[in-house]
Image: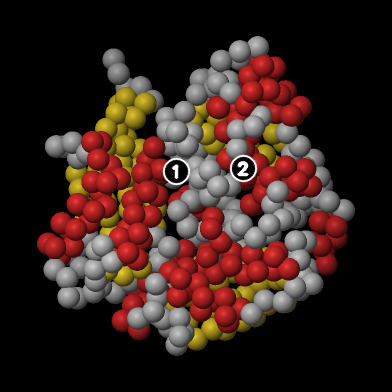
Amino acid sequence: MMKKNFITSESVTEGHPDKICDQISDAILDSLIAQDPYSRVAVETLVTTGSVHVAGEVTTRGFVDVQRIVRDVLKDIGYNDPAFGIDFEDAGVWISIHGQSPDIARGVDKEGAGDQGMMYGYACNETLELMPLPIILAHKLTRRLAEVRKSGEVKNIGPDGKSQVTVEYSDGRPLRLEAIVIAQQHKNNISEDELRKEIFERVIKPVCGSMVDSNTKIHINATGSFVIGGPEGDTGVTGRKIIVDTYGGIGRHGGGAFSGKDSSKVDRSGAYMARYVAKNIVAAGLAEKCEVALSYAIGVAEPTSVNVDCFGTYKVPEEKISELVRKYFNLTPRGIIAELDLRKPIYRQTAAYGHFGRSEFSWEKTDKAEILRREAGL
């Protein structure tokens, strides 16, 4: 008998309060790295009605105009109307940034990890991106929501929005879409019926297309109204969408957020490396699914553990796969930064619509797949 189950993932638009914070934190990081690639940055942002609070630790030879960056990010997202509860011209901006703790710096100076913790990377062969289908579709829906808003294709909608996709699986493979949920901020001068029609025709159909069947449940603004949104409707904080940022609840998560952290923080760089390793294993055909777990101790270069789990889908023994990982991937913080070229101002673009499954990022390359395949004897 076929085994059926349902997997749900969500995404949020760039105008969601938590994503505003991620983008501001990463825009500050990018500005500092552009001036000093060895900047050490740990910046957190909080937004609420009409105000932005930025705090953290920075050690750098560069200078950053935090006020300007905050306002530029708000403007780019589309917060240019006081009706949305915050706008780039009039928002209050509070800043509290100081130097990095010397106790942390000491460990990083000797090329060890900038913190302890565990990081997970995941890949599977159910999409071209080697990502789980539910999170890929959820991100495509929220990105499309932003596109139709910014282009004016759908009028009178705001920057805040969310998507949720439930996929029915049969024997571990995607079968059909069980449900699609959209929540989209809007102004009072568009009716709910008109909004639902526009979202279905211009967002859901172009993204999901033939995957929608007569039994797919579709909920668009299920409460009936979503006028109060953004920071006015909900306080936002950096790092509060870690499952949206990764694999949508498929695979595990170590708990560390990414945004606002430079690459010496293994919360970020270690997770990127784990994805790189897992994706190359799947791309090489060594397994249909793969989860790579890394753990580190502060100030220590080599990981304290490396674990590969292929969930029974491996084509060669997992012990052999682990051996190849150790042989062909440098898992020290210095090795990760060099391999993935992480001392570049690339981070703001990661801060919305997911850190994985996007070909523009170095950790998505599959340049090790051929040698892994050959060494595994496939």
Indicate whether 290 appears above or below 221. Answer: above
Residue 113: x %, y % from top left:
77, 50
Q: Are marks 1 and 2 in contact (CB under 8 Å)?
A: no
Colouring rule applied to residues: secondary structure
Q: Which of 305 and 316 lies nearest the eye of the viewer?
A: 316
Question: Which residue is at a point 67% across and 76% down the rendered structure image?
Answer: 64
Tell me the amino acid under the disc marked 1: Gly
Task: Tell me the mark number nearer the camera, choosing from 1 and 2.
Answer: 2
Quarter of the image where the C terminus is located = top right
At label 2, which amino acid type do we have? Trp
- Residue under the image location 28 percent in, 42 percent down: 208
Q: Which residue is mark 1?
A: 249
Residue 220 as seen in the image, left or right of residue 20: left
Around disc 2, counting alpha carbons within 10 Å, would you say few (fewer than 14), some (14 to 19), or many (20 or more)?
many
From the image, which quarter does the N terminus lie in?
top left
Residue sitting at x 58%, y 23%: 284
